[in-house]
Image (cartoon, rainbow, N blue to C red):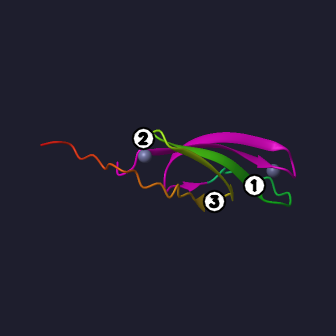
Amino acid sequence: MSSGVQWGGQWEHLACGATGEQLWADEDTVFSGHVCGRDGEVTWHAEWHCDECGATGDDLFDDDTVTYSDHNCGHDLEEAA
Ligand SMILES: [Zn+2]
Ligand SMILES: [Zn+2]
């Protein structure tokens, strides 16, 4: 674990009205897995949260995107030996 950032968000496909939600780690690809054959993109509205310092943010992006919080937490605590 190099980052305390966790993402959580919802996707929506306007063409058919389907929605869903998911949790994932920072710098992971988020993909709804939704394939209905209708036109239009699945869009995500997601928020991230840093467990280490409490910082938060939110973002909008297309399906099948790698998400970056761009959060550089001030303290990168290593386990004390
Ligand atoms: Zn759909
Ligand atoms: Zn932080």
Q: Is residue 68 left or right of residue 39?
A: left
The magenta-colored residue range is 1-30
Dot 1, crowdedness within 10 Å: few (<14), some or many (≥20)? Answer: many
Q: Residue at x 64, y 43 (%)?
A: 9
Residue at which label 3 appears: 64
Write the residue at 31% across / 50% down: 76
Q: Which of these two is toward me, 39 or 61? A: 61
Counting from the top left corner in percent of width and height, residue 5 is at: 46, 46
Residue 45 shows in the view: yes
Mark 3 → mark 2, Cα distance in angstroms: 28 Å
Q: Secondary structure at mark 3?
A: loop
> Which numbered mark, 1 or 2, is in the foreground of this view?
2
Q: Name the amino acid type tagged 1.
A: Val
Q: Which residue is mark 2?
A: 53
Q: Write down the residue under mark 1.
A: 42
Asked if residue 16 lies in the magenta stretch, the reply is yes
Residue 34 visible in the snapshot: no
Q: Main secondary structure of the magenta part?
A: strand
What quarter of the picture does the C terminus occupy? top left
Note whether ligand 2 is within 8 Å of mark 2.
yes
The percent coordinates of residue 1 (x first, y second) are: 34, 48
Distance from mark 1 CB to nearest ligand 1 atom below 8 Å: yes
Q: Is residue 74 above or below residue 66?
A: above
Could you tell me the amino acid type at mark 3? Asp
For mark 1, give the secondary structure: strand
Q: Which corner quadrant of the image does residue 23 belong to?
A: top right
State left or right for residue 29 relative to residue 36. Answer: left
Which of discs 3 and 2 lies nearer the camera? The answer is 2
